[in-house]
Amino acid sequence: MSFDGKMREPQKLDVSVALALSLLACAGPAAVASTIHHATQKRFGDWIAFCDNTLACSAVQVNSWAEPLRLVVSREGQRGAPVILTLGVTNDLWDTNATEFILGVPRRPEARAVFPVTGVGPLRKIAALSGEHALKFIRHLAQAAEVKLLARGSPGSTGVRRTASIAGLRHALDWIDQQQGAIGTTDAFVAIGNRPFVAHGKLPPTLVPSPAISQAERPPLPGAVKRRASRSCDAGLTNIRPLVLRLANDMYLWGLPCLEGPYNIGFEVFLADRHGGHVRRPPIGSSPTWENFRSLKLIWNPQFDAAHMTLKSKFLGRALGDCGEFAAYVWSGTDFEQAWHSRLDDCESVERDWWPTFQRAQIARMPLSYSSSFSDQ
């Protein structure tokens, strides 16, 4: 369902230049930021496979919003990391009393798994398997073209049954095996062999933010910063307050309103002192994909966590929030470093936790669950 309430086919974020400003909320947010290290993704039919900077990889089913279920296969890049198979069942199709789901391959009774319900998201009821049991069942799924789903629960539950396609999963899993060096090993999803799996991934880097500093002081925007505004920006956004963040005693991040849409505001940002001296562009932000705007680096709908000196950028592709881009940057005392980057261009009811993630880091003095869930903040 689109943001105006009408039922439509899944959308793409990119729009023509003529519609770029009026339909900014449905337009492609950015190119992959320059601070992403060796992250990659590839599409296989209704599946997107991707790996982040730590070589953690996932295959996410991005089928039509009308499909009854979505599967996600995930494996970290470190030795001994478990395989996780997550099942999401649409809210309008599950049995409201269901406590578990049974997923199986038609005409193959051995290819069957029981998923206990682990949570409820905004769009789906969530269930998951992990470890050796999950790996064995994923290998069965790699040989199948479709699956059957049964919702089972307490007395009085109706037992919802659905059939869904998983075509393309085998190719996505084989691609992940290639990226992680698992082909021909005992841990491979598809091309299973006898060699032990030697993980080549690494732990997320740890970023150390500078000490927190009061944000009470808000000096006026210096003229030297105003004059740095790009000609591609909309000069008529005078009703939007500039972004002013104090980073050190005499260092500020200044944000000039640049582009505006129904639920997105993009700011062009600069580092400078309170008088506009030593002005420069920080290595943050993302570039619109349309011609005449590609030179811009913008922060979208900014939020600043002053306690952890972390700036978050959130671009929504439409009101449902099932496509767009999320990024987070930590101020180290001298510059910003990227702590998180995830993006999904196709508006197909995919929850934000399942968007392709390309960069993630641990932030010192911040709980891990916080730094790994920027999409929820």
Image (tube, rainbow, N blue to C red):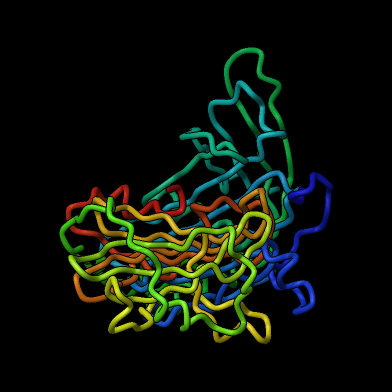
Q: Is residue 11 left or right of residue 376?
A: right
- Pick whichever, 12 or 309, lies toward us: 309
- Pick whichever, 36 or 101, lies toward us: 36
Question: Image quarter for residue 8?
Answer: bottom right
Question: Image quarter for residue 345?
Answer: bottom right
- Any part of residue 255 in sight: yes
- Residue drawn 60% across the image and 59% down it: 264
- Residue drawn 72% across the image and 55% down it: 165
- Residue drawn 22% across the image and 52% down it: 214
Q: Position of residue 90 (x, y in %)?
A: 66, 40
Is 127 drawn above or below residue 231 in the view shown? above
Q: Is residue 333 left or right of residue 99?
A: left
Q: Position of residue 154 (x, y in %)?
A: 57, 17
- Any part of residue 198 in sight: no
Is 238 drawn above or below residue 84 in the view shown? below
- Pick whichever, 324 or 49, lies toward us: 324
Q: Position of residue 85 (x, y in %)?
A: 48, 51
- Pick whichever, 298 or 324, lies toward us: 298
Q: Is residue 318 left or right of residue 185?
A: right
